[in-house]
């Protein structure tokens, strides 16, 4: 359980304080100025609670531009290379993904509206505008981290009946900075690592048995409100997450999801 779990939400504490302030303060002019200041702070999103899911610790991004400009994407839209969109082979359409160039730290949030790339070794195809944002036009490709920051429940809940591991590739690439930045930004100190998600408990059990046979320990099941069964490594402290991810990649489990532990 997170050390923050027993603390009142910051917004609740704030509003209790605000009510007390107005109760004790008889100066209407000062009160109105204070209220205007607070409304400005709220509008800036200080009290927003943004859930971030690390989807890929390290992946290769490419981009597509003029050749496909004006053509239809896989979800029926017209591709506009000046929009902040991207193609991915499996993430649900309208998933919002934060893409960070690991070589320069530049980031952009894109919306998935197309399928691809279909070149071996590449994970995501960005629009030209998105590629410009993260400084990869000259290189054409870049090593990036991918974080799911919004979209459909399917994106947040993992892909149904799709194994997150069992890759035939070699040892995964490890970039400790990617998770470290995610952890620092969230303030969370406990994490779940999702290996796969299934629409049936039977398939989840088969996958879990295979993972255990491969030497992965401390597996658990997590069932969402929509009935999706996740196979996870539960309740890892921040300092143990990166070592766990490295071990998973060495065993061929590369498509994990790292989630903040809420309960």
Image (spheres, rainbow, N blue to C red):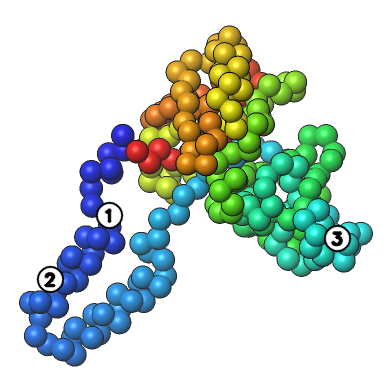
Across and down, in percent, residue 9 comes to 27, 54
Specify few, some or many for label 1: CA neighbours under 10 Å numbering under 14, 14-19, or 20 or more: few
The reply to whether residue 181 is in sight is no
Distance between the alpha carbons at the discs numbered 2 and 3: 57 Å
Residue tagged 1 = 9
| Picture quadrant of residue 131 | bottom right
Frontmost residue, 243 versus 78: 78
Q: CA distance from mark 1 to mark 2?
A: 17 Å
In the shown orientation, is residue 72 left or right of residue 220? right
The structure residue drawn at horizontal position 18% and vertical position 65%, both measured from the top left corner, is 16
Residue closest to the far bottom: 29
* Mark 1 secondary-structure assignment: loop
Mark 2 element type: helix
Residue 123 lies, with reference to residue 40, above or below; the image says above
Check residue 20 in the rendering and tell me which mark sits there, or answer none. Answer: 2
Q: Quadrant of residue 117?
A: top right
Measured Cα–Cα span from mark 1 to mark 3? 45 Å
- Residue for badge 3: 72
Q: Position of residue 172 (x, y in %)?
A: 66, 26
Q: Position of residue 25 (x, y in %)?
A: 10, 80
Q: Which mark lies nearer to you, 1 or 3?
A: 3
């Amino acid at each position: 359980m997170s050390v923050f779990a027993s603390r009142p939400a910051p917004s609740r504490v704030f509003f209790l304080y605000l009510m007390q302030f107005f109760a004790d303060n008889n100066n209407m002019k000062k009160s109105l100025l204070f209220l205007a200041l607070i409304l400005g702070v709220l509008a800036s999103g200080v009290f927003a609670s943004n859930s971030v899911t690390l989807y890929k610790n390290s992946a290769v991004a490419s981009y597509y531009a003029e050749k496909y400009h004006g053509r239809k994407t896989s979800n029926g839209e017209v591709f506009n290379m000046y929009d902040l969109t991207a193609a991915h082979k499996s993430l649900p359409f309208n998933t919002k993904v934060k893409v960070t160039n690991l070589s320069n730290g530049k980031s952009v949030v894109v919306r998935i509206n197309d399928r691809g790339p279909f070149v071996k070794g590449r994970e995501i195809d960005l629009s030209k505008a998105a590629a410009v944002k993260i400084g990869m036009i000259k290189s054409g490709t870049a090593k990036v981290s991918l974080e799911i920051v919004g979209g459909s429940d399917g994106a947040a809940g993992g892909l149904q009946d799709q194994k997150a591991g069992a890759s035939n590739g070699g040892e995964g690439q490890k970039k400790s900075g990617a998770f470290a930045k995610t952890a620092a930004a969230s303030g969370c100190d406990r994490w779940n690592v999702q290996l796969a998600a299934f629409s049936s408990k039977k398939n989840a059990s088969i996958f879990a048995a295979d993972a255990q046979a491969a030497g992965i320990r401390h597996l658990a099941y997590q069932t969402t409100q929509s009935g999706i069964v996740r196979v996870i490594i539960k309740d890892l402290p921040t300092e143990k997450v990166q070592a766990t991810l490295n071990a998973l990649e060495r065993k061929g489990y590369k498509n994990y999801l790292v989630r903040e532990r809420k309960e």
